[in-house]
């Protein structure tokens, strides 16, 4: 081999450009497809229910018109519920895939390693013990989630950096510890508080209002662009910390930023609807499989999370006669998937 | 491509936590040459390579890139001049070869600047030079160890730096693939004037491929220079604690190290 042959280089260049375009197209199509599915399911969940409303009525209500019956059912009940579900799913999906890709392990999702348990514990204490306002609950949940993440990080920190497996095992331990805090507070709660507090065990969209969702809406609107901006660096970190640093990524700074952004999204979503089981955990790996190896799965995971929560909540409300909390459905889906991932990761290493 | 970049360590002190790994190390890297660093396990070779690529903070002394302290430069600035291939980089599951090589363009893309045709060209060149153009659309998972290592080298080449640091680029490869990788690096050096610094375990390959050989002992410089001047029986005994015989390589006259174990030395004729 001597200097590069011009002809061969031209052919390679063509192949490289074509391959990149192909991957880019696939990325675009998958994101558009998932986005469209979210919009359709969102709209259907406004139209369908115990009483069905036609497309035009729903449109009227959304545009601010007054439609007999629909204004209350769609405008006051279904719209905040679906809106909350959408944003909660988006936030969980984004946060989950961020952790999973950053730690290169599908088990490293914030709901598995105890970060959402931290938010839950703080929220339960805020609601039942301190009786503070929903906004204060969100703030407390966020602070507790960040503190939990920080504590897990410190406990997992060993000379020369954080070992990922260690972090996951410590996280699982922390999760069960905080779970017992939640159970303890709930066991002392008055019966009429239980309905509210149950939200913090399984996650529930019942009684969702815009007022309670407002903090989450702000978090999603402000933090999603930050997260998307960091994705390029996150993609480099997937190659290993040293490789990323050699490529000019300030690894520690980016990692801390990613953790803060993802944990905040997670915490605000948890404060709005409780720790809806396994949404963060499921969305990343499934989105990665739909997307294929053509880039970061984080945004696709957010969209899939939104889709998952909307569909699961629809089933939880209407499919089984009684209204279940949405977390029951996602939990029932999540456990088998967890087992599947564990079995599979033994075989192939199973990175996201 | 003429090579103007210089890389030097001056009075370098490095360590992890309580432990001091390297102390008072002066290590100028000759520009446009192939430098190979050898030394026993845990002598600090990899640590030195990390510090020289700004991955590790220094305790004392400094690493100078073109006369400026590398630790005072931004990580991106360094990444445009100096490429590093660490010992075990991780390929995301299923990633295509061209996509992985494209990651090497990271330091050349700004906050908002998108992928340009220059980036495509750099990737195509890197694939061509490393002989991995046929693999462009394959998944990295499917490749053999030697192919994978060439792809990783292609990624560092796409970074288009004139200095290239590699931490044990031949580990886990069989002998054919080791030679393949070392030949490729030699081509890069001869054809493009790329300065290459690498850590190698195999002393004979080190002697054959190095223009400049550096022997590290317990975090300090034992000897540096022409392989034939550095790699002597005394050096191998002092640095590796190994009884040995050094003979001229019949193919090129470079030193060839024959280790003498406890069991088979008696069969040798005494010189």
Image: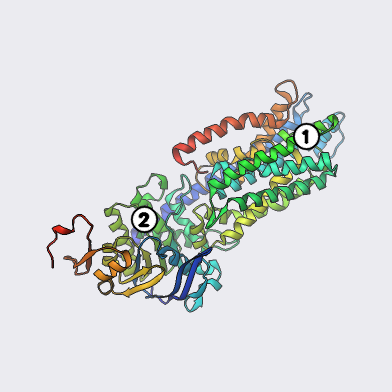
Displayed quadrant of residue A11: bottom left
Residue denoted by label 2: B150
Q: Is residue A161 above or below residue A22?
A: below
Q: As drawn, is A122 to the left or to the right of A340?
A: right
Q: Is residue B68 above or below residue B144?
A: below
Depicted A94 relative to depicted A310: above or below: below
Q: Quadrant of residue B238?
A: bottom left
SS for dot 2: helix
Identify the disc placed on residue A127: none
Quadrant that contains the N terminus of chain B? bottom left
- Is residue B182 rendered to the left or right of residue A107? left
| Residue count near mark 2 (Cα–Cα under 10 Å), binned few <14, some 14–19, many ≥20 | many
In this rendering, would A12 be left or right of A116?
A: left
Residue A171: % across, % down:
61, 44
Q: Can see residue A302?
A: no
Residue on which disc 1 sits: A186
Residue A311: x and y in percent read 67, 31
What is the secondary structure assignment of the residue under circle 1?
helix
Residue A315 locus on image (x, y percent) = 69, 27
């Amino acid at each position: 081999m001597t200097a590069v042959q011009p002809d061969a280089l031209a052919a390679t260049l063509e192949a490289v450009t074509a391959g990149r375009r192909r991957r880019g197209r696939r990325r675009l199509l998958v994101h558009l497809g998932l986005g469209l599915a979210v919009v359709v399911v969102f709209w259907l969940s406004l139209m369908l229910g115990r009483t069905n409303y036609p497309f035009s009525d729903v449109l009227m209500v959304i545009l601010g018109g007054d439609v007999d019956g629909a204004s209350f059912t769609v405008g006051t009940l279904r719209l905040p519920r679906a809106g909350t579900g959408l944003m909660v799913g988006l936030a969980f999906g984004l946060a989950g895939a961020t952790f999973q890709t950053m730690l290169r392990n599908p088990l490293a999702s914030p709901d598995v390693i105890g970060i959402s348990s931290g938010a839950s514990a703080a929220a339960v204490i805020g609601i039942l013990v301190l009786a503070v306002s929903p906004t204060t609950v969100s703030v407390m949940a966020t602070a507790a989630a960040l503190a939990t993440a920080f504590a897990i990080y410190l406990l997992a920190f060993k000379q020369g950096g954080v070992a990922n497996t260690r972090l996951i095992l410590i996280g699982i331990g922390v999760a069960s510890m905080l779970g017992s805090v939640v159970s303890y507070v709930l066991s002392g709660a008055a019966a009429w508080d239980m309905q509210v507090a149950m939200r913090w065990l399984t996650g529930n969209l019942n009684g969702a209002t815009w007022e309670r969702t407002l903090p989450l809406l702000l978090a999603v609107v402000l933090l999603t662009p930050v997260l998307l901006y960091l994705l390029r660096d996150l993609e480099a970190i997937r190659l290993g910390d040293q490789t990323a640093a050699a490529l000019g990524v300030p690894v520690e700074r980016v990692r801390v930023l990613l953790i803060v952004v993802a944990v905040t999204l997670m915490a605000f979503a948890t404060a709005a609807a409780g720790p809806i089981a396994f949404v963060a955990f499921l969305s990343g790996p499934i989105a990665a499989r739909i997307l294929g190896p053509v880039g970061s799965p984080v945004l696709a995971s957010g969209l899939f999370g939104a889709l998952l929560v909307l569909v699961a909540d629809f089933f939880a409300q209407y499919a089984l006669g009684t209204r279940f909390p949405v977390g029951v459905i996602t939990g029932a889906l999540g456990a088998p998937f967890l087992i599947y991932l564990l079995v599979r990761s033994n075989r192939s290493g199973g990175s996201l | 491509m003429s090579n103007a970049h210089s890389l030097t360590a001056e009075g370098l002190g490095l360590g992890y936590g309580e432990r001091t790994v390297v102390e008072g190390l002066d290590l100028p890297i000759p520009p446009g040459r192939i430098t190979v660093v050898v030394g026993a396990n845990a002598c600090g070779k990899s640590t030195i390579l990390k510090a020289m690529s700004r991955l590790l903070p220094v305790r004392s002394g400094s690493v100078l890139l073109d006369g400026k302290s590398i630790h005072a430069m931004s990580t991106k600035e360094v990444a445009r001049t100096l490429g590093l291939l660490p010992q075990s980089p991780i390929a995301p599951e299923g990633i295509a070869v061209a996509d992985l090589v494209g990651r090497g363009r990271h330091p050349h893309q700004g906050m908002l600047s998108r992928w340009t045709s220059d980036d495509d060209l750099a990737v195509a060149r890197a694939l061509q030079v490393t002989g991995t153009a046929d693999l462009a659309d394959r998944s990295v998972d499917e490749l053999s160890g030697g192919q994978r290592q060439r792809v990783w080298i292609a990624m560092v080449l796409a970074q288009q730096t004139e200095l290239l640091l590699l931490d044990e680029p031949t580990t886990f490869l069989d002998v054919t693939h080791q030679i393949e990788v070392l030949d490729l690096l030699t081509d890069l050096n001869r054809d493009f004037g790329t300065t290459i610094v690498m850590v190698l375990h195999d002393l004979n390959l080190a002697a054959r491929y190095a223009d400049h050989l550096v022997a590290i002992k317990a975090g300090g410089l034992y000897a540096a220079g022409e392989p034939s001047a550095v790699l002597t029986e005394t050096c191998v005994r002092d640095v590796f604690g190994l009884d040995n015989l050094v003979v001229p390589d019949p193919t090129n006259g470079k030193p060839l190290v024959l280790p003498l174990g406890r069991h088979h030395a008696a069969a040798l004729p005494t010189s």
